[in-house]
Amino acid sequence: MPETLSPSPALTVLSEEEELFRQTVREFAESEIRPLVHAMDEAGSFRAELIGKFFELGLMGVEVPERWGGAGGSFFLATVAIEELARVDASAAIYVDVHNTLVNNALLRWGTDEQKARYFPRMTSGLLGAFALSEPGSGSDAFALQTRAVAREGHWELTGRKFWITNGAEAGIFIVFANADPAKGYKGITGFLVERDFPGFAVGKKENKLGIRASSTCELILESCRVPETNVLGPVGQGYRVSIETLNEGRIGIGAQMVGVSEGALQAALGYVKERKQFGKPVSEFQGVQFQLAQMRTDLEAARLMVYNAARLKDGGRPFTAEAAMAKLFSSQVADRITSTCVELFGGYGYSKEYPVEKYYRDAKIGTIYEGTSNMQLLTIAKSLLK
Ligand SMILES: Cc1cc2nc3c(=O)[nH]c(=O)nc-3n(C[C@H](O)[C@H](O)[C@H](O)COP(=O)(O)OP(=O)(O)OC[C@H]3O[C@@H](n4cnc5c(N)ncnc54)[C@H](O)[C@@H]3O)c2cc1C
């Protein structure tokens, strides 16, 4: 059993290695990302040099074995990185989240040794990944995807459009899902490793969004895109498993992102209510405000415990699907509530872009949508209850 499941007295007590890692990411986020957050949000684009630093810091191969350039760490460590980055900037967090918990994870679980040896050294040193499942007409009903894969001599041809693809503007490698045998329904879905410069592949429009504005979200266009036979990820016709099982894990990362967003907003509000004076004293001295703070702290503790528990269950090789869905559902609801309350605690200033909380409020919303909407998490949880 991995060391991270070890005899920790409580879920929130980290091992020495985990604590050191947390501190490193926190210091990096505070010193290198925080000063750029507002400008990146306003511009709606992420600074390329920060992505380079994610690689340099070893944040882009947290679970990848050392022989392929990774850090050989746990899934839990990846969630710690995501939480700490999201505390400062949810957009920064999602670059690291998608790359680790979706792309690296899918390749680790479903890739051949040859694919891992070919791609991981690049994916831990500069090649950013994206995960392309959604399409204009298929989101929650992901298996209704219309992108088609046709087998040719020595290669496949992929044709279709993908929508909402995180990291799309900067990624060099995309896990693309296409149906290789529509007659078989979802059992035709197959995963492919598609490089940005493969013939017939193009990145289209970038979305202008409510929140996580600096994170790129793009359309992908595949027109008879030529993908070598050696780039099929997992067995042909098993792409539905590759996608769903990867997302089951990825959801824990989104939970961590929501915990980080909540913590960031709460810390900002704590600072503010101690400074802001009304009726001759700091507003933190009003019991009504104290109760709001205490409620937020309690909600956040519960969300964090659920996320850590799901991550540690996964690391321990135990069933975690329902726990991951509950963690994502709850932590995104909590983030929605906490960031909203924090805007209110800042009063009118909370509504201004001069102060940090309105951004946390906008960034929180995505947690209820991507990697399965809240309703889809409820479906998963209900299924586990009734099976
Ligand atoms: C910023 C951003 C980044 C994204 N990144 C990626 C990415 O990297 N890769 C990727 O593949 N996708 C990505 N997505 C897509 C995302 O996963 C989908 O938007 C999401 O799964 C919802 O699908 P949809 O938008 O088609 O909504 P729909 O599926 O059309 O849902 C609309 C509403 O109907 C509800 N609903 C649908 N079906 C049911 C049901 N059976 N029971 C009850 N309610 C239901 C939903 O909960 C929702 O409220 C991203 C989206 C956004 C906004």
Image (tube, helix red, strand yellow):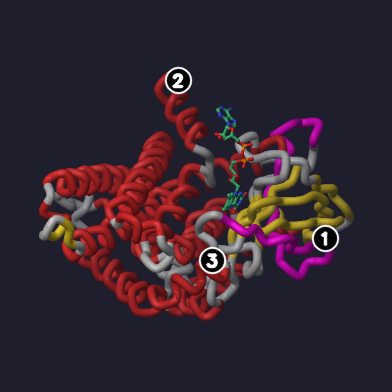
Residue 46, disc: none
Name of the residue lying farthest toward the top: 386
Q: Which mark is residue 214?
A: 3
Residue at image location 51% in from the left, 78% down from the top: 52
Q: Residue 242 sits in which quadrant?
A: top right
Viewer-nearest of discs 3 and 2: 3
| Disc nearest the viewer among 3 and 1 | 3
Residue at 47 percent across and 42 percent down: it is 368
Q: Is residue 376 left or right of residue 281?
A: right
State the SS at label 2: loop
Where disc 1 sits, the SS reads strand
Residue 226: numbered disc: 1
The earlier-in-sequence mark between 3 and 2 is 3
Write the residue at 11% across / 59% down.
281
Viewer-side residue, 345 vs 324: 345
* Residue type at tag 3: Ala
Q: Is residue 386 left or right of residue 236?
A: left
Q: How far across and down, in percent of the image, does residue 197 sit?
A: 76, 70
266 with respect to 226 (left or right) = left
- In magenta, the rendered stretch is 182-209
Q: Which percent across, then down, holds residue 151? A: 84, 49
Q: Marks 1 and 2: CB-CB under 8 Å?
A: no
Q: CA distance from mark 1 to mark 2?
A: 42 Å
As helix, strand or loop, the secondary structure at mark 3 comes to loop
Neighbourhood count class around disc 3 (C-alpha, 10 Å): few under 14, some 14–19, many 20 upward: many
* Rendering quarter of residue 201: bottom right
The image quarter in which residue 386 lies: top left
Q: Which mark is residue 387?
A: 2
